Image (spheres, rainbow, N blue to C red):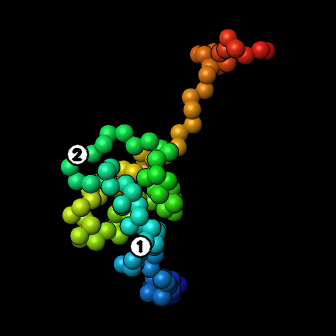
Amino acid sequence: MFCGKLTLFILLVYAITSPHLVNGGKQTCVKPHMKDKLLRTCYPWIKHGFVRYYLPPNSPCCAEVRKVRNMDMNCVALMLSPKDRETYDVDKIRGLQTLCQLRSPPSRRNKDGKKFMDCWSIS
């Protein structure tokens, strides 16, 4: 009985004194001036309403997206002021992470796993 009470007491003390991982502080994934530059650069793709369909991964917009730590666009969306939310679409900002990922080119292999032979290559 005493061990159970002691264990409960230790857990209670630990829960009260341990720092909380979730806090309501400001997000720090990007500096405010970098956030503003990202919003200006990516404006055609993240504004409310009609959007350009294709965003090239080598565009200036994607270059700004890659400057954000871990390309965490959710963090950038949480940093928006109410005025910014009137101008920019939060869902489109979050979608930049997927649109700006660099993709490796497809390999030139047939279904057996062997490389295709080019006409111009000498083996």
Of the residues under marks 1 and 2, which one precedes in the sequence?
A: 1
Q: Name the residue under label 2.
A: 50
Query: Which quadrant of the figure has residue 53?
Result: top left
Question: Residue 109 at what x, y percent from top left?
Answer: 62, 20
Q: Mark 1 points at which residue?
A: 32
Question: Residue 54 at what x, y percent from top left?
Answer: 37, 39
Residue 71 appears in the figure: no
* Point 35% across, 70% down: residue: 79
Element type at mark 1 = helix
Near-viewer residue (19 or 11)? 19
Element type at mark 2 = loop
Q: What residue type is labelled 1?
A: Pro
- Disc 1 residue crowd, few under 14, some 14–19, many 20+, Cα 10 Å: few
Instruction: Using the image, determine if residue 38 lies above or below residue 117.
Output: below
Query: Do the numbered discs 1 and 2 sit on residues whose CB atoms are within 8 Å?
Result: no
Instruction: Using the image, determine if residue 28 lies above or below residue 46.
Output: below
Near-viewer residue (55 or 30)? 55
- In this rendering, position of residue 6 left or right of residue 39: right
- In this rendering, position of residue 24 left or right of residue 100: left
Instruction: Using the image, determine if residue 117 lies above or below residue 57.
Output: above
